[in-house]
Amino acid sequence: MIKKLRKKFICINMILISLVLLVIFGALVIFQSKRLEIETTTRMEQSLDRSFDDNPKKLGIKSEKRNAAPADFIPIYFVLTDMNGHILSQYDTNTSLSSDTLSRAVEEALSSSRDNGILSDLELRFLRRVVPEGFKIAFSDLSYEISSMRTMLINYTITLFLCIIAFFFITLFLAKWALHPVEEAWTQQNQFVADASHELKTPLTVILANLNILLAHPDDTIRQQMKWIENTQAESARMKKLVDHLLFLAKSDASQIPVDFSSFNLSDAAWSCLLPFESIAFEKKITIVEDIAPDLWLFGNEEQIKQLMIILLDNACKYTCANGTVQFHLSEEQNKILLTVQNSGDPIAPKDLEHIFERFYRSDKSRAHKNGGYGLGLSIAQSIVQKHHGKIRATSNAAEGTVFYVTFFPEKKKLPATK
């Protein structure tokens, strides 16, 4: 799919660029053609303004010079005729016409219904003016214009070809650069679907196996098969929890989670999340050290913030060995609220630390399965923090253990009402 998308991107981009370049170069060709026509017409008008009784050099008719302007090279031939079309006088600059060609040119120019135009069969441009003696007619050889246009078209065609080649390579680079996030998202989506399917397959397999056992003993009582029923219930609960997490992340990605923000007491919320873990810590022989600043208020969604704290505390308790320590700190510094959850134990390898917020990522898969984790908790935590415009990061080393830092930037602070 990505390859097809990249090819489509390149094709559409090249078609649009080619059309734009063609329009630009077409406009330049038309402009240059009109410019040549105006130059030639202006030169012809200047020729008709001269007196035929003067010497051409005195009239300012320039002979061909290498350092002359391009307009001075335009071949001009002009004549004075009577009303019947007989040539009375004639001059030429930089060109000469045969008598037969000149007679045909004069005849066609006089028979034309317009005072200017092109004699295509003779490759001449003419300009006619009525004077007391008859007509003044100026002729210009189109070879100059044709030659100039041919040279210009060749140059423009080469330039257009080179531009298209250059834009093609630029488009190749842009296609790879622009579609890289799409490719990553596609890969992550496929991996996400594969991981989710794998995680759902395990509890479903257990549930189906338990049901087969129950069906194989239809005469047994519920008490006799309680082991398999409880096991099925436990796996169903685990699967429901996984589905709930998947739905949360999917809705979060689609921005479909209703966010009801209000000011709430963050300190009280922290205590309510911390207290249930006292019994868990007691069972695992873990010490929880808390340092919660009083009366900290945050403008946000209280339920989601509580979910964030529970995820971090649950993660800390899971990976803290017996006789270990979990530290929970909540404070305010320089108009920022800082939440820190630290646990002792084996540090996370640096290669794994940068991936811990990715979905279904677990540095020790066997250990995660043993603890009942799916690798979605930290992804949910990161999503919640981002919804609240905060920042979350983690460090891990042998000296300090693993530490999660969450920073909030309160938009609104509300003090408790005084009686």
Image (spheres, helix red, strand yellow):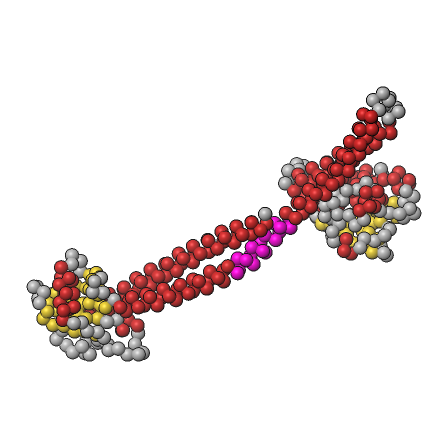
> Residue at position x 39%, y 56% from top?
23
Who's the residue at 30% across and 76% down the image? 68
Residue 390 visible at all:
yes
In percent of width and height, residue 257 lies at 66, 37
251 vs 332, left or right, is: left
Q: Nearer the viewer, residue 418 or 404?
A: 404
What secondary structure is the stretch in magenta mostly built from? helix
Give the vertical position of 364 relative to 55 (above or below): above
Q: Report which quarter residue 200 is drawn in.
A: top right
Indicate whether 211 appears above or below 350.
Answer: above
Residue 312 position in % (x across, y down): 79, 44
Q: What is the x, y in percent for residue 418?
A: 76, 37
Q: Is residue 267 left or right of residue 32?
A: right
Q: Quadrant of residue 51?
A: bottom left
Q: Is residue 267 visible?
A: no
For the point 84% across and 49% down, the residue is: 343
Q: Is residue 97 left or right of residue 253?
A: left
The boundaries of the magenta stretch are 169-185
Task: Report the quarter where the C terminus lies.
Answer: top right
In the displayed orientation, state which residue is furthest to the front: 216
* Count of numbered labels shown in the rendering: 0
Q: Residue drawn 14% across and 65% down?
A: 104
Report whether 262 appears left or right of 174: right
Q: Nearer the viewer, residue 347 or 222?
A: 222
Which quadrant holds residue 243? top right
Residue 97 drawn at (x, y percent): 18, 71
Q: Is residue 20 magenta?
A: no
Q: Nearer the viewer, residue 361 or 298?
A: 361
